[in-house]
Structure formats: structure tokens, C-alpha cells
Image (tube, grey):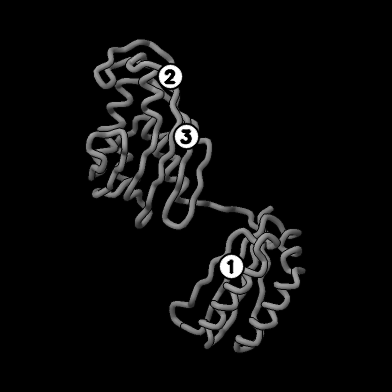
Amino acid sequence: MTFVQVIDCKTRRYDDMNRLMDDWVAATEGKRTATHSIVGRDHTDDEHYVEIIEFPSYAKAMENSNLPETNRIFEEMVALCDGMPSFTDLDVVRDEQLNKATVRRFYEEVAVGGDLDLVDELFTADYRDHDIAKAEETTVGSDVIKQDVTGWRAAFDFTFTLESVLAEGDQVCVLWTWRGVHQGDFMGLQPTGQEVSMKGTTVWRFEDGKICEGWWNEDLLGLLRQLGAVDA
């Protein structure tokens, strides 16, 4: 079970505290068990800070605490604080990564399910689409997604398998496998009934909870080979 430790402190020496955290990251390289750390400053009190540290489990958190480097840094951190920091230990019982959920809805409900009305809910109106397979590599507007989905659905009966979905900051990266049956005109190719597949990656960027930019990289040449449009 994922484990989170919340450290709450007050300090007037945040710059020194920040350098101390950099020292800890460098000193524990290859040994620390923490997987994610985020520091927040109180919006109404610029001397109040909260650090949230994530570990794979409580046992791994204890391993991290027992590192000599962690003990040394903690003692120096206390010296920089106005009073003793407080600690809250949490077992994570729910972890909802909302941007990842939005991306999954695009593949499952829009691309495969054909719900084009959902596009305006998931994408910004000025969405920017980057696709190296297109003659115009960058196109703008959520209608681009509607047009692309409509075109692909007319040409193929297909599914997406999301092999990996990784989120960091305002971006979500998806490694996907697409499988389809050629049932309509595709780039001038008449339907062949051929079963085909293609791998690719898409990086999605978010703004205010909606997808505002996407970068596509897919094996279109491999798909055309399967359809007999180019030599193997």
C-alpha cells in the first residue's frame, strides 16, 4: 500500500531549507526509497510550508528514515525551523489521477466509442494538435480531434490498448497499441478487410483540467505496409 508522510513546519529561511533538500536528494541518490516529493507554501502565510513525500509502502518509508543522510538532513532542517516540525503518516486508500482519467476517456469514449460531443468537455477550444504524419504538422482547434476521429472510424473498426499511461506535472504520456479492420477509404486505399495493428505514443498537455495540446507519434508506415500500399 502506498504510504505518504506530511511534514508541516514554519521557517523564515526557506532558501536555506531548499538548498538542504537539494543536498538530501544528491546524498541519497541510489539509496532513497521516496518516489515523489512536493512542497507547498501556505497561500496566506509565507512562513508556513508543507512537504508531502510518497513511498511505495510504510516499510520503504522506514528504510528511508533510517538512512544516515536522512537523519543528518533532518537535524539540520529542525535547526532552520521555527519550532519542531509536525509529521502525519498516511496510508493511501484512494489515489485519483484526474488527468490520466481524462485521457482514458478520450481513447475509450471518443476514439473507440465515437462520442464526439464529449470532445468539447475534454479539450480546450484552442487545442493544438501536432502529428508528424500529417502534411500540416500543427493544427488548431478541438474540431481537429472530431475530424480525425470521424475519419479513422470511417476507415477502420478499431480498438486501443493503453499499454502505459504516465503522468507528470501537466502532461500525460500514453504508449498505445491500435488494432483495426480496414473497412472504408483510407488515404485513397479502398477497403481490404485486412486486420492491421499499429503502435504509437501520444503526449497530452493539460490546462485548467482540459487537454490543450497533443503530440502524436505513430507507425503509419508500418500500417501502410500491412495494407499493401508500400513495399515491406
Q: Are marks 3 and 2 in contact (CB under 8 Å)?
A: no
Asked whether 117 or 200 is in front, the reply is: 200
Label 1: element kind: strand
Dot 2 or dot 1, earlier in sequence: 1
First in sequence, mark 3 or 2: give its number.
3
Q: Amino acid at mark 3?
A: Trp
Q: Position of residue 163 (x, y in %)?
A: 53, 36
Q: CA distance from mark 3 to mark 2?
A: 14 Å
**206 and 115: which is toward the camera:** 206
For label 3, the residue is 176
- For label 3, the SS is strand
Which mark is nearer the camera, 2 or 1?
2
> Tag on residue 196?
2
State left or right for residue 126 relative to residue 211: left
Dot 1 or dot 3: first in sequence order is 1
x%, y% of residue 6? Answer: 62, 70
Q: Which residue is found at the position 32% from the left and 50% from the top? A: 212
Q: Which residue is mark 1?
A: 52
Q: Residue at x 36, y 34 (%)?
A: 110
- Which residue lies at the image location 73% right of the left edge and 59% below the top edge? 60
Relative to residue 48, is residue 71 drawn left or right?
right
Q: Quadrant of residue 200?
A: top left
At label 3, counting other C-alpha atoms closer than 10 Å, the crowd grade (few under 14, some 14-19, many 20 or more) is: some
